[in-house]
Image (cartoon, rainbow, N blue to C red):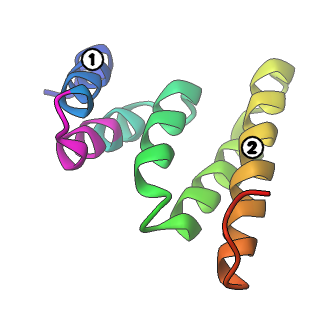
Amino acid sequence: PNDYTTLIKLGALKEAMGDKAGGRSCYQLALAAHPRDLHATIKYTNLIFEKEPEVAVRLWEDLLANVGGNLDLRAAALEQLICKKEWWERIKRGEMPYH
């Protein structure tokens, strides 16, 4: 199915049942259906960050670059980007991703 709402709900269900790979797949499909969606980006990047932090950061950079004039969405994307990018930079230096 390519229905965004169904994919988000199915992803949440799979994630809650411990199927992170299944949740990740559903969120990735939801994000493909709505590439500028904040909720899908949050859910997907949270699940991939541990293994693919550079991809998560790139997704936030892309979202921030393409949200247009929606200030609420820009602020939310920037907040996530700053956090994920800082964590990724710390990981690259061999540090823990938090303070």
Q: What span is colored magenta in the figure? A: 17-27
Residue at image point 76% right, 29% down: 76
Q: In this view, does 1 lie to the left or right of 41?
A: left
Q: How far from the left and from the top, in percent, is residue 61?
A: 71, 54
- Count of numbered tags: 2
Label 2 CA crowd tier, 10 Å (few <14, some 14–19, many 20+): many
What is the residue that sits farthest to the bottom in this orientation?
Answer: 93
Q: Quadrant of the N terminus?
A: top left
Q: Name the residue under label 1.
A: 9
Specify the amino acid type for callout 2: Leu
Give the foreground label among 1 and 2: 1
Please say if 65 is above or below 36.
Answer: below
Element assignment for label 1: helix
Residue at image point 73% right, 37% down: 77
Please say if 57 is above or below 68.
Answer: below
Q: Does any portion of residue 88 appear in the rendered image?
A: yes
Residue at image point 74% right, 43% down: 64
Please say if 70 is above or below 60.
Answer: above
Specify the amino acid type for callout 1: Lys
Q: Quadrant of the C terminus?
A: bottom right
Q: How far from the left and from the top, in percent, is residue 82?
A: 81, 51
Cα gap from disc 1 to disc 2, whole angstroms: 24 Å
Circle 1/circle 2 CB separation < 8 Å? no
Q: Does any portion of residue 35 appear in the rendered image?
A: no
Q: In which image quadrant can residue 8 be found?
A: top left
Q: Name the residue under label 2.
A: 64
Label 1 CA crowd tier, 10 Å (few <14, some 14–19, many 20+): some
Front residue (pair 14, 65): 14
